Amino acid sequence: MSKQAEFAVILKMNAMFADLGADELQRLSNLCHTQHLGNGEVLFQKGDPGDALFGVRRGQVRIETGASDGSRLTLNFMGSGDLFGEVAVLDGQSRTADATAGEASELFVLRREDFLAFLEREPKVAIKIIALLCQRIRWQSERMEESMLQPLPVRLARRLCALAADFGSEVHISQEQLGVFVGAARESVNRQLQAWRKEAILDLQRGRILLRNMTKLTSIARNE
């Protein structure tokens, strides 16, 4: 399968492009090129021009932002098949967060000028984008609610379930990174993970978490 065909498959799996026909997807994917990133390499930083839409062919990209005290907040993890950069590529404004490779990665890149030209020819794609952006707003609202109202076990279980959906039962993330992701101290995260380890819900190894009982973890995430 060619790289353009792979990108077409990724586009088809995304809500923004799901209703496009095979020919339309092929025309759009033909506009892309690929870019390689090494582990820890910065793709873009907050304030950089929003000049491209990205799709992850393989690897992992962290979407992060910084605070005035120097701390980092991980907003999302992007894995194989994920698209990101939609907002900046649409409005042409600066990036609102940083993107850094969590491991060696290969990305599909669709430039803003090529994408906008395609939207002018395919207005139904623009309608799907509006729906996608609304979903993102809802996601942000839910995460804010989690951080303010939900207890740590629920927040932690939801994050692990979301990561498992992208990366499988072996999640490569440190406890410090996970703490930043759920808005909790590393010590609090460690205590909860150790409790779940004793219950055989998961296993802990250096730099990764092995999820053993997704049924139980999902139940906790639902606050059941």
Image (cartoon, rainbow, N blue to C red):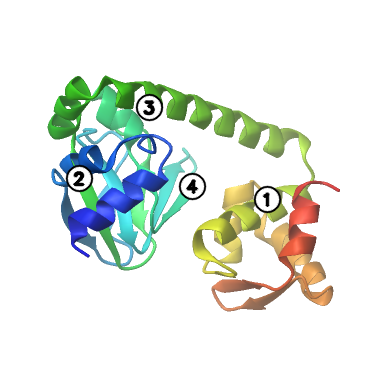
> Picture coordinates of residue 1 (x, y %)?
22, 65
Q: Which residue shows up at 79% across the image and 75% down it?
A: 200
Q: Which residue is mark 4?
A: 76
Q: Which residue is mark 1?
A: 158
Q: Is residue 21 left or right of residue 207?
A: left
Q: Is residue 94 visible?
A: no
Residue at mark 2 to residue at mark 1: CA–CA distance: 35 Å
Residue at mark 2 to residue at mark 3: CA–CA distance: 18 Å
Q: Earlier in the sequence, mark 2 or mark 1?
A: 2
Dot 4 falls on a residue whose secondary structure is: strand
Q: Is residue 129 left or right of residue 27?
A: right
Residue nearer the viewer, 168 or 118: 118
Q: Which residue shows up at 75% across the image and 50% down it?
A: 221
Q: Which residue shows up at 50% across the image and 31% down it?
A: 136
Q: Which residue is mark 3?
A: 129
- Mark 4 crowdedness (10 Å alpha carbons): few <14, some 14-19, many ≥20: some
Residue at mark 1 to residue at mark 3: CA–CA distance: 26 Å
> Picture coordinates of residue 39 (x, y %)?
32, 67
Q: Earlier in the sequence, mark 1 or mark 3?
A: 3
The residue type indicated by label 4 comes to Asn
